[in-house]
Image (spheres, grey):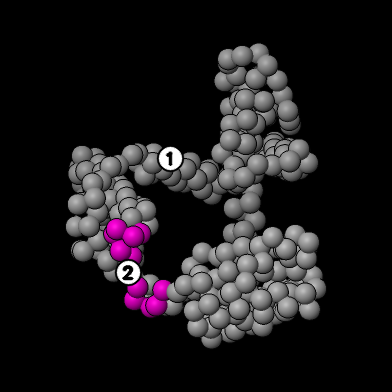
Amino acid sequence: MPHQLRGRRGWISLALLLALALLALVGRWDLRRRHGQPELRRLVAQAGDSVFTVARLRAWLAAQPESLGSEQVRAWLEGWVEDQILAQAALRQGLDTLKGAREELGRIRLRYLRGLLEEQSLSESLSVSTLELKTWLKGNGALLELPERRLRLEWWAGRDSLVLARLAREVARGRDVGQRLEGLRVIHGRTDYLARGELEPGHAEAAFRLKPLQMTPVLPLSTGWVCYQLESQRPAGWVPDPDEDEALVRAAMLQDLRWKRLQARLEALRQEAVWKVDLDPLLEVEAGVPPPRR
């Protein structure tokens, strides 16, 4: 076991050095390719020859799933600067020229380029008709079949367990409490359909005992208390209806078609390319067989 740990640490260290060296190489692209409006070429971060412009930062921010505050952006840029400083130090020490490092950097580049090609293929638009959707679902329903029961829950959360318990009793009787929530300092929401493992163990135990519209007791949270009401459920083996759940079926169908199209393109490229895999030379060398005369 100690030998294995040392081996893992060695690979992790090498991977880190390779990644840092790659960052330093990639980080210089902006300096060489700065074009366009002058204000977009202004620098928001720099580490040696590697620069980060306003244009590049705007593109990065646009790709984020949620908006970030100025402090979060500053922290990310400081991390980028630190990565660049370490990567440039690795380059100055010639770590990128080591035999194993050169090979691994080449593989990283190839994997990155392959990822770009796959991403481009998967992002291409597809359109399917309602009839095609229903036909696809008949033959591929197993792809969407739920392996376990899932619950959709309505929840109320607050810091005062007694307030929440009284509120829960009113909700269980069918009373509308929506207008009072702010005054009671209670927040309210709904979940998507959740599996047991997506809830805290104690919460899952209580929620999965519920019948429709029943409520759990008040349950502890790290920041207060919560109670759940079972709004609806999907049993194990559930398959979406193409009329009622068209968006869900369509998303799954498009993903399936895109992956199949990608595999077909890969196979076509393999057929067009000149390539081979042949282990005979290795086996002959290991066996001491002299190479054939040319």
> In the image, what residue occupies the spot 58% across and 27% down?
29
Is 160 included in the stretch rendered in magenta?
no
Badge 1 marks a residue whose secondary structure is: helix
**Which residue is under mark 2?**
239
Name the side, left or right, on which 275 lies relative to 223: left
Residue 114 relative to residue 7: left or right: left
Say what amino acid the circle numbered 1 marks: Leu
- Number of the front mark, 1 or 2: 2
| Residue type (three-letter) at the residue carrying disc 2 | Val
Q: Which mark is residue 116?
A: 1
Side of 225 relative to 234 (left or right): right
Q: Earlier in the sequence, mark 1 or mark 2?
A: 1
Quadrant of residue 198 within the rendered picture: bottom right
For residue 276, say whether it is visible. Answer: no
Tell me where residue 110 appears, x and y as whole percent. Answer: 44, 42
Q: What distance separates the C-alpha of mark 1 from that of mark 2? A: 33 Å
Q: Chief secondary structure of the magenta span?
A: loop
Tell me if residue 239 is in the magenta stretch.
yes
State the extent of the magenta-drawn residues as a range.
234-245
Q: Is residue 103 above or below residue 61?
A: below
Query: Pointer 1: residues within 10 angstroms few (<14), some, or many (20+)?
Result: few
Q: Position of residue 140 (x, y in %)?
A: 25, 63
Q: Where's residue 61, x and y in %? A: 62, 36
Image coordinates of residue 275 in percent, x first then y, are 25, 44
87 sits to left or right of 174: right
Residue at (51% x, 64% y) in the render: 192
Q: Is residue 201 above or below residue 152?
A: below
At 67% across and 67% down in the image, what residue appears? 177
